[in-house]
Amino acid sequence: MEIFKGQNIVEFTKRFETDLDCKRYLAEIKWENGYECKRCKHKKATRRKDYSMCCTRCKTVESPTAKTLFHKVKFGIRKAFLIAFELSASTKGMSDSQLSKRYGISRPTAWLFTKKVRLAMKSTEQIAMEQDVQVDEFVVGGHEVGKQGRSYESNKSKAVCAIELTKNKGVKRVYIKSIEDYSSKSLRGIFETHISTSAKVTTDGWRGYRPLKEDYQIDQVNSEGGKNFIQMHTIIHQVKSWIRTTFAHVHKGHIQEYFDEFCFRINRSIYKETIFHKLIERVVNRSHVAYQAIKLSS
């Protein structure tokens, strides 16, 4: 198939002029490696005009959107494609209220669909950081009166960030994980998920990292007001600024998905030409998520 490349909205709208154009794109991704009937496992089918597949044995019809995150989208596949393009190809993405106004859909509908897209943006957790890694914690939100440093009583959203540096000290990859507190148990999560035991990890002097030295190569140094963690503090500033200026409010129960969106874009900043296609691949490969399931996970 000819994948879509680029960030030009005019070229995008020319490529995907109708819902049928979008369904064709989904079908080419979904059945790229061949067709198999979900019901009887037969491998032969006839393709219909709407790019759905009809099994030649049991006559089961499967649409390109079936069992994907596009399943039962009620406002049109083309609008869904445009929203996915906005969230992936643009530098900062868009808030649900902005998308609601731009595409003529209700805000709850925009919230539900963007939440599904952010689920597709979640890291596959298949490739661990193996080289020069920095880890630090931060909070999302302003200063709270009477709360200093790593206060366990703060109501702000707490997070831990890990970045992998290139040989030239540039940022190669970024992962951010929401945490309940700054304990060693909470901090261990991002290590086990994203950091190889062979990586050389640098943290500040926080005591929560000390027990992790049994399993990871951790060097604790003084922050020196951020001078020893310039790249890290730049990333933390970017994510906090993005959340503050783009969204009116982000609930603590949903903030991980916003971290996933931020990391998805920044980790593919040098692959912007194909970032939309990569997102659509993930949307197709992720199973349908019901609204009730999303609410329960909130």
Image (spheres, helix red, strand yellow):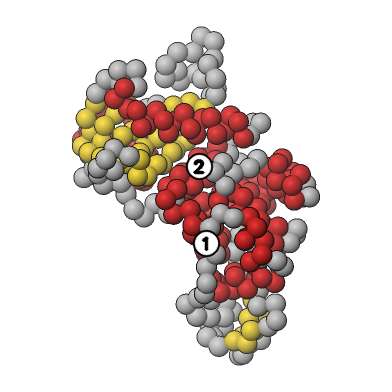
As rendered, which of 47 and 158 lies closer to the eye? 47
- Which residue is depicted at the point 52% across and 72% down? 2
Q: Position of residue 223 (x, y in %)?
A: 30, 21
Residue under circle 2?
Answer: 262
Crowding near the residue tagged with mark 1, few <14, some 14–19, many ≥20 C-alpha atoms within 10 Å: some
As rendered, which of 246 and 286 lies closer to the eye? 246
Quarter of image, res 40: bottom right
Residue under circle 1?
Answer: 5
Which quadrant: the C terminus? top right
- Which residue is depicted at the point 55% across and 88% down? 44
Q: Type of residue at label 1?
A: Lys
Name the secondary structure under disc 2.
helix
Mark closer to the chain start, 2 or 1: 1
Quarter of image, res 64: bottom right
Residue at the far top in the pictured view:
146
Residue at the far bottom in the pictured view:
57
Q: Type of residue at label 2?
A: Phe
Looking at the rendered image, the disc whose residue lies closer to the viewer, 2 or 1, is 1
In the image, is residue 283 above or below residue 163? Answer: below
